[in-house]
Image (cartoon, helix red, strand yellow):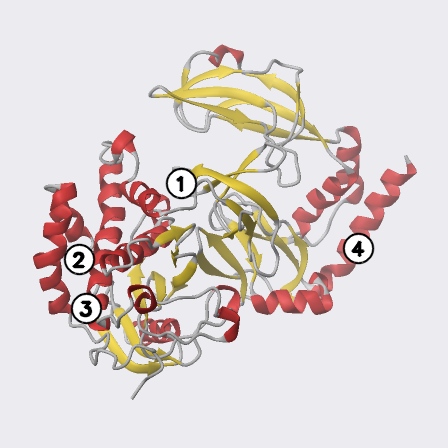
Amino acid sequence: MPNSSGFGQLPRRNAAVATEELRRFIQGHELPLRRRTDGDRAATILRYGAFVGSVIEHHDSLVRAMDRARGHIVSLEEGNRSVIGGTVIVADTLSSSRGRFARSWHAPAGGLWGCLIHANTLLPKSRRFLSLAAGVACCEAIRQEGAEDACLRWVNDVLIAGKKAAGFLIQGFSGHLDEYDLIGFGININNQSFPDELHNTATSLAETVGHPVDLHRFTVMFLAKLTWNLGLLYFEEASDLRGDGFSGCKGEHLLLERWKELSDTIGKRVVFGQNVFENPVFEATVTGLRDDGGLMLQLDDGSSLAVQSGEIRYRVQK
Amino acid sequence: MANEIDFDEILGKYRSDPYDYIDVCAAHTGVVRCQVAEGGEVTAPSGEWLHIPGTVLYEITRERNSKLVTSQTNGTVSSIHSELDGRFVEAGEKLMTIRHPMKKKEIIENILKEVLFLFPAPERAKYFFSLDIQSRIEKKGTRAVTIKAGDEIIIMSLMKRDTPVYYDGEPGVIYSVYFNPGVSVNQGDPLIGVCAPEKLPLIQKIITRVKADWDAE
């Protein structure tokens, strides 16, 4: 019987991943893969990110994963217990998910929907890269699963053939005892039916590769990529604090270097705004990425400015 | 929050010296080269998005990386530590002072800052009101929106990471808003000024008095 994915029978496995399974995948696949490009430091970087998936909580359905994360923090802290950093909450469906500015986010069965609780132990200079790290991790996983032309639109939208396949909502949250970043993720994997308003702008991984994707395997891979990319933030922070600077070519932060490899934003004509749908502010051409992750833009009068906040949409060139 | 104000003293001070004196300090360690002279005019950032930098004040070089530091305000260089030119300085060392001529509106805001409870920016970022506060402002205007400690009032936005900011000051109405959506605010700079309802008449008195005094000139 056909289902809503449009690809016949979906793989039966869901996003219910065990921590041990993630660890085995990292040792058996991610570490060898990273050693090819990063040599001996690969193991160190993965150790820095090993908090990811310390606990993985799976639900058949949730209202919102971020709300579940906040409730989890509050209930543990009220009992004077610590929240385990790196706890991941995933659900097969979300009934009332939303993106930034309370935009609705369609989260039916077949996608990867969830949230990572990151205890805020980064310095502000590194913490600002959390958004980039989430996008890079997702783009890497999507490419590895077969959508090789997936790319990043600043800050961290993952696009396939110009359509959005994944989005992230990153919010700070202060408990009574500690401060956290909640990294919400929504990745269209096998879900293929979108609300009318998203029909021309959203896509899924399965739609791109032309067959259903093993959601379980993808979840493990995505968490492994998060382990690496969040590990990079700690690795580079430690390197910088030692006075060694960053480790990329020309002393660039490894995460920024990777972001540039995966992004097609630089050189694009864009519309910018804090909330670009409701209040587009100006058009400009992207000229580069600053060391702090900010976007460098050239306005039509020839002047330049940098933005560290807000969002862009690509302007279709005629 | 001050309860009483000696209007004559404050207004006398601004009338005799209607300037703000802004110290310019080294952004970080390095060798400085001053790019302005005492008495020189400097300009503030301009352009619709304040994207055209102000006058270059000094160049600072650290480990062969040079950085030009520009003026954030307009005015005149009233004093300069020229003995530091070409020398290594520590971060925060005072390099010069800019005398900025204040407008009537700035004078009012400066006086109000002594009366209002100022809620500072927790870090350098862009800020906007939370959805609830924004909708209340749109319906009634800021000065009709009352807030209390614990209210989520502002969202701090940096690299698409949104952090709710909770108010922790005295209850009152949002009287002054010091940030613009889309413009970065430095850590510690005030975001809003809050006034207890019973002090609103005092605020009105300040504004009326300053306007009357300045308009009379």
Q: Quadrant of residue A114?
A: bottom left
Which residue is tagged 2?
A50
Q: Residue B60: where, in percent of width, then height? A: 44, 21
Which residue is tagged 3?
A217
- Circles 1 and 4, Cβ within 8 Å, touching? The answer is no
- Give how far apart the Cα atoms at labels 2 and 3 are: 18 Å
Q: Residue A143: where, in percent of width, then height? A: 27, 56
| Marks 1/4 same chain | no
Question: How would you rate the neighbour count of disc 2 (Cα within 10 Å): few for under 14, some for 14-19, many for 20 or more?
Answer: many
Question: Looking at the picture, which amino acid does disc 2 mark?
Answer: Ala
- Give how far apart the Cα atoms at labels 2 and 4 are: 58 Å
Q: Which mark is residue B204?
A: 4
Question: Looking at the picture, which amino acid does disc 4 mark?
Answer: Gln
Judge depth for marks 2 and 4 and give the one in front: 2
Q: In this view, does A192 lie above or below B200?
A: below
- Give how far apart the Cα atoms at labels 2 and 1 are: 25 Å
**Residue nearest the viewer, comparing B140 with A306:** A306
| Marks 2/1 same chain | yes
Question: Looking at the picture, which amino acid does disc 1 mark?
Answer: Asp
- Residue at 42% over, 13% down: B87
- Circles 3 and 1, Cβ within 8 Å, touching? The answer is no
- Give how far apart the Cα atoms at labels 3 and 1 are: 33 Å
- Residue at 52% over, 15% down: B34
Q: Is residue A44 above or below residue B38?
A: below
- Residue at 78% over, 39% down: B104
**Secondary element type, mark 1:** loop
Which residue is tagged 1?
A292
Question: Looking at the picture, which amino acid does disc 3 mark?
Answer: Arg
Question: How would you rate the neighbour count of disc 3 (Cα within 10 Å): few for under 14, some for 14-19, many for 20 or more?
Answer: some
Q: Residue A176: where, in percent of width, then height? A: 36, 67
